[in-house]
Amino acid sequence: MKTIVSTIALLAIAGNVLMAGGDFTEPVEPEIFIPEQEIIVIDDDVKYSGFYAGAALSHMRMSEAVTSNGYAVTLMGGYYFNQYVGLEARYMKTLFDLEIDSSRPIVTTQDVLENVGLYVKPMYSITTGLALYGLAGYGQSTYCKVSGGDYRESGFQWGLGAKYELANGVGLFVDYLDIYDDDNYDGLTVPDVRFNGTTVGATYTF
């Protein structure tokens, strides 16, 4: 009799425990979905060093007693040591008759403007292929006047520009070159003579 009572008591206790405990299945962790991100690979096929050559169209301007200006061809060659500095040689010469701008109506003349120089070219990269640069060096400019001979001045020259290097060595650029800015010019007794050029062109880095 005692055995039966004990068995019934154990069954009752076990039933209460099961009812109180509820479902003993293990909890299921929630699934976390992380979307896949597309990785874009940029093909940086820009040449930052090596020899380069280029050609461009320039507008040259000489201001003395009158202002002479005309379009010119520019040829250049140089070497990029890295993306921060280069060395460049440049030659510029007007192609057609110059326009003479004075107080009178504009006339043309067969005068010629010319310049040759060697420049250090520091560069500052803004983004892939795009950079600002400076030019600083020594050059010789020539003002050939059909009515009065050739005038030449040598000295420090500087410039500022921007370039964009495309893939496979091709590049585009625009810059300003200050060729001469002083009183007189090789015997031309004229104050505040200005000689400069603005250039747009293309280069190829080998």
Image: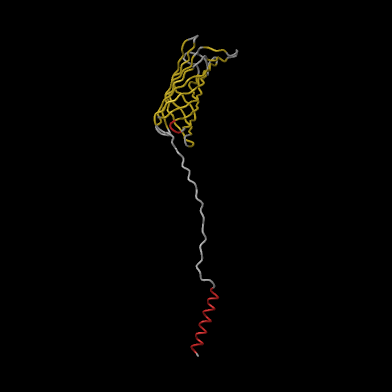
Q: Quadrant of the C terminus?
A: top left
Q: Position of residue 174 (x, y in %)?
A: 50, 27
Which residue of the protein is positioned furthest toward the top in this rendering?
A: 147
Here the colouring is secondary structure
Image spot of residue 196 (x, y percent): 50, 21
Q: Give x and y (percent) for residue 153.
A: 45, 17
Judging depth in this view, the residue of 12 and 135 nearest the camera is: 12
Q: Position of residue 60 (x, y in %)?
A: 51, 20
Q: Is residue 96 above or below residue 44?
A: above
| Viewer-closest of 23 and 86 | 23
Say above or below: 126 vs 67: below
Quadrant in which residue 170 is drawn? top left
Report the label total.
0
Residue at the spot 51% in from the left edge and 81% down from the top edge:
11
Residue under the point 47% across and 13% down: 144
Q: In the image shown, does 49 or 61 lie closer to the viewer?
A: 49
Q: Nearer the viewer, residue 14 or 114?
A: 14
